[in-house]
């Protein structure tokens, strides 16, 4: 088996590494900079200081017309804005949505046509130019967008991506200090998103020895720090481990890919506007328990990393995985059934139809998921039930 590895040209990970942002800007000899962020972050003193420092060496255009789970229209506005400005460097500072948009601005602003023309499922144009240099600075621990070559966009009823290696960051600065102000629920959602990246990459049919090592370390770091970071956002050790775990998970899933959890999560975001991390979280226990029979050895390894009461003599079954993963979600106070998000049973057919369109993701599942499988998983997530029982699990997982 052969495989290729791609990484950002420069990655810095650790407390305070944002201080090197000025150094990176100077190396690029930028005169005009486009800084993409959101209005909430731009009000933080730490971010204001970053902008002020950059303005001492270059002219800065600040763009904040962004949105969570960005739509195609949102991306089109930003790319058009970037085309109008004579900028040398793009900086994305924010969560995954901001970083995804920054990548699109840097690359598609030097291309003809619209963003729609470059979508994975329906676009007819190809990316041919590297575009503008880009520096990506995540402020959450979860998406891994700072190391991947895709940008995710919301479309009516589904999601699609623009994907090309030219979207990979030139510089990624992963500073856990920027995540301290993230509120508990967002910390939980983005943290479970990162955990999902690691687990799905580990189980992917495209996994290799490098991605396995990255994913295993990511699972260890994230599972050991997520609850602590949610319960106490000022916990520096937990924030550091969660940031590093998210970065490693991003590298892992960038190369091995994600699969069924993400395929089924995308329609939840588009149809019900459930945040991406929460869409993954509510589905994670049901998808993994359902597919576990197709990858028993690797699922045992997942349990060994995630179960605080793991013992080498214990052998897990499908309902054991469901209980374990549900407990992880409950421990960070996220919903564990679709009913809690207002999804109705009559919505499951439409969700299934849209999930089936995510062939790029479904192709990586160790268990090929049919339409019937997908409906069954949604049904389990709707009712909050175990594979072998017809009654909802309680908070103790029994």
Image: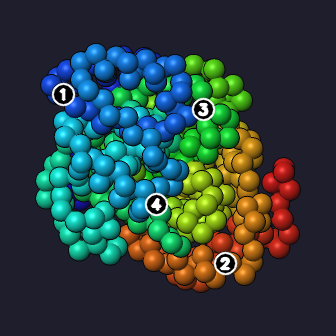
Picture quadrant where residue 224 is located: top right
- Pointer 2 residue: 348
Q: Which residue was labeled with disc 1?
A: 31
Question: Foreground mark, 4 or 1?
Answer: 1
**187 shown above or below 365:** above
Q: Which mark is residue 343?
A: none
- Name the secondary structure under disc 4: loop
Comparing labels 1 and 3, the label whose residue is closer to the camera: 1
Dot 2 crowding, Cα within 10 Å, few <14, some 14–19, many 20+: some
Mark 3 touches mark 2? (CB < 8 Å): no
Under tag 1, what secondary structure? loop
The first of marks 4 and 3 along the sequence is 4
Q: Residue sitting at 46 percent across and 60 percent down? A: 71
Give the mark nearest the N terminus, 2 or 1: 1
In whole angstroms, how far apart are the C-alphas of marks 4 and 3? 23 Å
Taking 70 as reference, is 389 above or below it?
A: below
Which class describes the residues within 10 Å of circle 3: few (<14), some (14-19), or many (20+)?
Answer: some
Q: Which residue is mark 3?
A: 182
58 or 245, which is in the foreground?
58
Q: Is residue 84 left or right of residue 348?
A: left
Front-lying residue, 219 or 112: 112
Q: Position of residue 394 (x, y in %)?
A: 86, 56
Q: Residue at x 41, y 62 (%)?
A: 72
Circle number at residue 71: 4
The residue positioned farthest toward the front in the image shown: 84
Q: Is residue 167 visible?
A: yes
């Amino acid at each position: 088996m052969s495989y290729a590895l791609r990484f950002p040209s420069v990655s810095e990970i650790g407390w305070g590494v944002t201080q090197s942002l000025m150094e990176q800007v100077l190396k690029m000899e930028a005169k005009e900079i486009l800084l993409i962020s959101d209005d909430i972050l731009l009000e933080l003193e730490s971010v204001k200081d970053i902008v002020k420092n950059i303005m001492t060496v270059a002219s800065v255009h600040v763009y904040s017309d962004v949105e969570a789970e960005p739509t195609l229209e949102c991306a089109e506005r930003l790319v058009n804005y970037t085309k109008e400005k004579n900028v040398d460097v793009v900086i994305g500072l924010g969560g995954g949505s901001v970083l995804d948009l920054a990548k699109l601005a840097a690359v598609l602003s030097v291309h003809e046509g619209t963003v729609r023309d470059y979508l994975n499922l329906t676009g007819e144009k190809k990316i041919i130019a590297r575009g503008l240099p880009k520096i990506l600075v995540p402020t959450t621990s979860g998406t891994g967008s700072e190391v991947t070559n895709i940008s995710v966009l919301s479309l009516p009823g589904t999601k699609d991506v623009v994907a090309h290696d030219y979207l990979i960051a030139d510089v990624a600065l992963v500073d856990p200090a920027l995540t301290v102000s993230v509120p508990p629920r967002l910390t939980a959602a983005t943290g479970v998103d990162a955990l999902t990246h690691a687990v799905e990459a580990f189980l992917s049919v495209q996994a290799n020895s490098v991605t396995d090592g990255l994913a295993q370390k990511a699972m260890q770091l994230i599972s050991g720090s997520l609850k602590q970071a949610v319960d106490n956002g000022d916990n520096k050790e937990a924030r550091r481990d969660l940031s590093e775990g998210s970065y490693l998970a991003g590298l892992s899933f960038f190369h091995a890919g994600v699969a069924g959890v993400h395929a089924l999560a995308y329609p939840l975001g588009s149809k019900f506007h459930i945040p991406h991390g929460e869409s993954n979280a509510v589905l994670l226990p049901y998808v993994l328990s359902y597919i576990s029979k197709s990858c028993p050895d690797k699922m045992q390894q997942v349990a060994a990393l995630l179960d605080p009461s793991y013992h080498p003599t214990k052998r897990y079954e499908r309902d054991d995985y469901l209980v374990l993963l549900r407990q992880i979600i409950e421990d960070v106070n996220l919903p564990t059934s679709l009913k809690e998000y207002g999804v109705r049973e009559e919505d499951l057919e439409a969700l299934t139809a849209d999930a089936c369109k995510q062939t790029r993701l479904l192709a990586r599942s160790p268990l090929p998921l049919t339409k019937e499988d997908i409906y069954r998983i949604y049904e389990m997530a709707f009712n909050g039930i175990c594979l072998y029982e017809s009654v909802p699990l309680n908070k103790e997982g029994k």
